[in-house]
Image (spheres, coloured by chain):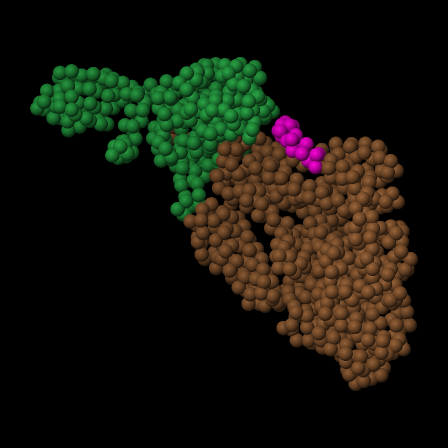
Chain colours: A brown, B green
């Protein structure tokens, strides 16, 4: 027995960060995964392109290919997401098994080198998988008479797509890797991943869908923009500011975000002490943080769900928060301790979490989390308007409108909200922030307006009330039967379900209730019939705006079955078109057929919608001279109009560096949404009040 | 009392190693190793024995650099093992339930080891594989437990390690294969290439191979001796004494001259004693008692283990009832 030697400290060798021999071994082991990726990409690009392009009109092939390679092919997105998660889980799967941990940690490779090398092998597999697909795509493109002229375009877009989706892959890979390194079990890692990548809006949308109100608060570029994700992390927010400052694209931002998570993952693995090989978490404290993180998520989700079920109301939100905190606590305990016996463990922690959740919920109405408070100066905003208005002089008609307006505001969603007055415009687009209506469109016509608004914002004034005050004078004039007074009406029949703000605020685009919209149309009809165009100016309700953003999740077929369609049906007729070999009934609300009825007909649609339109129809629409086709999501996208289409001169959007109530930008500097001005042609000749 | 080991010290030194699992202060907290100190000479075969939960596997995992001890350290020739990849090239750890790649074959594993271990020997791998008669391309998860053990030994020895840490490695091997593996170890040791550290609770397995034994109990090391020394210092004595004589009463009362008696059993005039002391001292004392008959029976390692454990309060009778 030796008892004379105590602890001896010698210099540890770090063992480096990467092992090329291990890398080669891992690549060799991962060949099957790489092959799987290659097969998926083979079907995603060469096969899909070959099949789909055969069904497109020859003249549209170029346009189609461009969209297919850039936007409308969903497989690469799914692939990048799935492969990222799968590769990460594979790369760090060894951390979750005592036998493999013992084995790996006994190998002559440092922990970080092993972790990084395996990760690098996973990324490399995903990268290499693009090569065989590229070769096949090359052959397919050259072999196909249709695609041969587009060879350069196809291969160039494929290269771009590879870059884009590898960035996306890396993002999901890093997030999952981080979750795996911090957590100990696959289940928890997956939960963490879902949380990191902002799954809550998806749940919320799913819930809404189940209960018949599909208003998804995410959109299909959600995962690319990561808007929810950025709310979860101050680091990400800071990074996005840096990215905006340096004019990074969102892909580089994704990579940056991925790198941040990768660093966290590596640090977790490096400092993961040996004993934790047997326990799920790096540190007990982290376990607690993760647990309460999950509980808070569950509670907030619960509050939203209950509020949605109950149709609004603060009580149900609180009820959901409390009940889901308790459920989350029980579930977390069961998962973390791997036994339901520990379900009611650590009650004090649950109470603390509950208090935190309630505080967070309590802060919502105080608008603590509001971000978009900056109002741009008028010089920075070209013109952002929605008004397609009529000017009414007939007091009876005005009173009739008054009734309709009240009905419009008495939308079921806001029936418990008092109607707080008229505005100069009938805002049938109604914005909400956590259920509280907020008028967002501000018409700033002078420097004094702007200053007043800024002062009010700085003074934390009630924004909607201030707007009402601003509009009071003309309204009062109307009620005094002032013959010179007028009410300007803007009607937007919108099916765009809504958007989420970078700060997590949600804006609902509550279109005017269908009933109210129908009444408005009836009034118009009556007015024309009884008074003639001399009383009701021809510009009245000059435009019907069809929003056909399929990408927002609102099905086109659903739109045309709306009662609104019943009113328009008389002016429409069904049309059929050929799509490949299949006869498809499309576009019963072909805007060109309405051209004689209204002065301005506009169709706003995205690429998905556009592809359902035949060339013939497209040409007919264009002949009306009032067609606007819009697709894409960013200013750059809007600039990429099909060369055959033109952007109508009267339609323009604003673009400024500041967040703008009418054109809202995300933290990356992209326009989140734009209000288009659908001015009537003789807008500038509108009579003075 | 800190001192720096000389750099040319080739022994393995385990110095005041303590290891606790679970959060301190909670009921999940388990102190697995408690200031374990031992020295293992290069070129010896060290057997680590102990009861269930004594900390054998934990000690091996600390020695393999898998676990970082809470205090103390393990050095190989003066080099600390934790995260020391250069040193780990010389160490192979064989766990009780060795990890293999899912659906991997021996060839896959060999390829992996070949890339990871600098001293991998294809020649040794081929030779051992033929001796073990294991199919290189068969999935290891189709192997029996014993075959998996063979595979792990095959792969481990092919890495040509200087230190081989074995946790219950013989468990599951048939007697022939067990002897063969022992012989392999002995040959490697004889060539001066290997220092195996074998943890087991099967004393019989270690008895004929180990030249050094460390006994772990409740996280602490009870003793750490050479096997010959261990065996030569404790003896089982069968005595037949005439009933009623003072010598018989004395022995029955637990006295055997000046030598410490570990246990006494009496059946009529036949006494079975386990006594500590050298062979000469024990025989001398026995003869002094004028027995009708006496005989010294060598103790097996297992019996020594049981005796030592009983002395430390391990209640074997309690288990049996």
**Residue B169 appears in the figure:** yes
Residue interval drawn in magenta? A20-40
**Residue A193: x %, y % from top left:** 60, 47
Give left or right: position of B304 versus A642.
left
Q: Could you tell me residue A184's position as x and y percent?
A: 53, 42
Q: Where in the figure is residue B90, as x and y percent of width and height?
A: 53, 24
Q: Is residue A23 magenta?
A: yes
Q: Is residue A297 left or right of residue A658?
A: left
Indicate the quadrant where residue A521 lies. Answer: bottom right
Front-most of residues B4 and A370: A370
The residue positioned 48% from the left and 59% from the top of the image is: A351
Where is the N terminus of chain A found, in terms of image quarters? Answer: top left
Q: Give coordinates of residue A553: x percent, y percent.
A: 71, 55
Q: Tell me, yes or no, whether the highlighted magenta stretch contains residue A123.
A: no
Given residues A41 and A8, the one toward you in this image is A41
Residue B204 location, quadrant: top left
**Residue in the foreground of this view, choosing between A506 and A141:** A141
Q: Quadrant of the C terminus of chain A?
A: bottom right
For image coordinates 66% across by 40% down, the residue present is A83
Note whether A113 is above or below A511 in the view shown. above
Q: In which quarter of the image is residue A527?
A: bottom right
Q: Relative to residue A300, is residue B172 drawn left or right?
A: left
Q: What's the magenta bit mostly, secondary-structure-wise?
A: helix
**Residue at screen point 80% across, 48% down:** A583
Q: Is residue A621 positioned above or below B133 on the image?
A: below
Is residue A384 shown to the viewer in this render? no
Residue drawn where x is 74% and y is 53% of the image: A551
């Amino acid at each position: 027995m030796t008892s004379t030697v105590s602890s001896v400290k010698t210099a540890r060798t770090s063992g480096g960060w990467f092992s090329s021999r291990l890398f080669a071994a891992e690549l060799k082991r991962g060949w099957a995964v790489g092959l799987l990726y290659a097969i998926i990409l083979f079907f995603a690009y060469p096969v899909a392109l070959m099949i789909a392009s055969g069904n497109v009109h020859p003249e549209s092939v170029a346009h189609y290919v461009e969209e297919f390679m850039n936007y409308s092919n969903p497989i690469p997105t799914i692939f990048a997401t799935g492969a990222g998660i799968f590769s990460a889980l594979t790369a760090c799967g060894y951390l979750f098994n005592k036998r493999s941990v013992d084995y790996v940690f006994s190998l002559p490779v440092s922990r970080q080198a092993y972790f990084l090398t395996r990760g690098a092998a996973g990324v490399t597999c995903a990268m290499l998988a693009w090569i065989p697909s590229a070769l096949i795509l090359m052959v397919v493109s050259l072999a196909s008479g249709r695609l041969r002229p587009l060879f350069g375009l196809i291969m160039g877009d494929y290269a771009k797509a590879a870059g884009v989706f590898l960035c996306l892959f890396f993002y999901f890979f890093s997030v999952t890797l981080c979750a795996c390194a911090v957590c100990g079990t696959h289940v928890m890692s997956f939960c963490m991943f879902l949380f990191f990548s902002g799954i809550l809006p998806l749940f919320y949308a799913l819930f809404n869908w189940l209960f018949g109100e599909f208003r998804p608060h995410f959109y299909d570029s959600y995962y690319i923009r990561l808007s929810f994700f950025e709310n979860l992390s101050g680091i990400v927010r800071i990074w996005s500011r840096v990215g905006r400052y340096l004019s990074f694209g969102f892909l580089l931002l994704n990579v940056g975000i991925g790198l941040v998570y990768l660093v966290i993952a590596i640090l977790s693995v490096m400092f993961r002490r040996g004993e934790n090989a047997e326990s799920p978490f790096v540190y007990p404290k982290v376990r607690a943080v993760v647990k309460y993180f999950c509980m808070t998520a569950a509670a907030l989700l619960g509050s939203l769900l209950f509020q949605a079920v109950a149709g609004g109301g603060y009580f149900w939100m609180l009820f959901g928060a409390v009940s889901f905190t308790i459920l989350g606590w029980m579930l977390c305990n069961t998962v973390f301790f791997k036994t339901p016996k520990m379900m009611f463990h650590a009650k004090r922690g649950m109470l603390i979490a509950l208090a935190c959740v309630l505080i967070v919920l309590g802060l919502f109405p105080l608008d603590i989390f509001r971000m978009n408070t900056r109002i741009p100066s008028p010089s920075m905003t070209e013109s952002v308007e929605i008004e397609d208005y009529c000017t009414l002089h007939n007091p009876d008609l005005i009173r009739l409108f008054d009734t309709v307006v009240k009905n419009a505001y008495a939308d079921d969603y806001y029936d418990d909200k008092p109607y707080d007055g008229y505005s100069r415009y009938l805002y049938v687009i109604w914005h909400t922030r956590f259920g509280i209506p907020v008028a967002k469109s501000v018409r700033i016509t002078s420097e004094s307006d702007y200053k007043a608004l800024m002062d009010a914002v700085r003074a934390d004034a009630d924004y909607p009330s201030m707007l009402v005050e601003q509009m009071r004078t003309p309204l009062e004039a109307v009620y005094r039967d002032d013959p010179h007074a007028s009410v300007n009406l803007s009607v937007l029949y919108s099916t765009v379900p809504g958007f989420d703000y970078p700060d997590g605020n949600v804006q609902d685009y509550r279109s005017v209730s269908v009933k109210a919209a129908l009444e408005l149309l009836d009034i118009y009809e009556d007015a024309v019939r009884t008074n003639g165009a001399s009383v009701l100016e021809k510009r009245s309700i000059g435009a019907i705006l069809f929003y056909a953003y399929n990408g927002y999740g609102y099905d086109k077929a659903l739109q045309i079955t709306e009662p609104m369609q019943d009113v328009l049906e008389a002016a429409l007729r069904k049309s059929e078109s050929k799509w490949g070999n299949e006869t498809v009934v499309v576009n019963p609300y072909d805007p060109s057929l309405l051209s004689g009825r209204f002065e301005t007909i506009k169709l706003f649609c995205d690429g998905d919608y556009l592809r359902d339109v035949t060339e013939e129809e497209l040409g007919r629409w264009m002949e009306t001279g009032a067609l606007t086709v819009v697709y894409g999501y960013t200013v750059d996208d809007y600039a990429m109009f099909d060369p055959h289409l033109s952007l109508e001169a009267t339609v323009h959007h604003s673009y400024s560096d500041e967040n703008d109530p009418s054109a809202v930008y995300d933290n990356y500097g992209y326009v989140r949404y734009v209000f288009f001005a659908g001015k009537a042609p003789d807008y500038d000749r509108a009579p003075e009040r | 009392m800190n001192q720096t080991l000389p750099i040319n010290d080739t022994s393995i030194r385990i110095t005041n190693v303590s290891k606790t699992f679970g959060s301190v202060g909670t009921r999940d907290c388990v102190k697995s190793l408690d200031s374990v100190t031992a020295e293992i000479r290069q070129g010896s075969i060290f057997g680590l024995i102990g009861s269930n939960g004594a900390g054998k596997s934990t000690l091996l995992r600390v020695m393999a650099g898998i676990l970082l001890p809470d205090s103390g350290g393990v050095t190989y020739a003066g080099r600390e093992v934790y995260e020391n990849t250069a040193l780990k090239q010389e160490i192979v750890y064989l766990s009780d339930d060795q990890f293999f790649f899912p659906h991997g074959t021996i060839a896959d594993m060999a390829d992996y080891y070949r890339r990871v271990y600098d001293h991998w020997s294809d020649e040794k791998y081929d030779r051992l594989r033929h001796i073990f008669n294991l199919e290189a391309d068969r999935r290891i998860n189709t192997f029996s437990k014993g075959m998996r053990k063979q595979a792990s030994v095959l792969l481990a020895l092919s890495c040509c390690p200087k230190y081989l840490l074995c946790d219950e490695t013989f468990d599951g091997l048939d007697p022939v294969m067990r002897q063969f593996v022992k012989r392999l170890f002995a040959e490697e040791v004889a060539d001066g290439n290997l220092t195996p550290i074998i943890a087991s609770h099967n004393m019989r397995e270690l008895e004929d191979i180990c030249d050094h034994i460390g006994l772990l109990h409740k996280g602490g090391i009870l003793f750490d001796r050479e096997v010959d020394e261990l065996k030569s210092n404790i003896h089982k004595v069968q005595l037949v004494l005439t009933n009623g004589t003072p010598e018989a009463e004395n022995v029955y009362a637990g006295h055997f001259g000046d030598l410490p008696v570990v246990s006494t059993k009496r059946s009529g005039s036949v006494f079975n004693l386990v006594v500590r002391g050298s062979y000469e001292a024990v025989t001398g004392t026995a003869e002094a008692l004028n027995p009708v008959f006496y005989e010294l029976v060598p103790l097996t390692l297992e019996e020594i283990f049981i005796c030592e454990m009983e002395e430390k309060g391990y209640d074997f009778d309690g288990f049996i009832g």
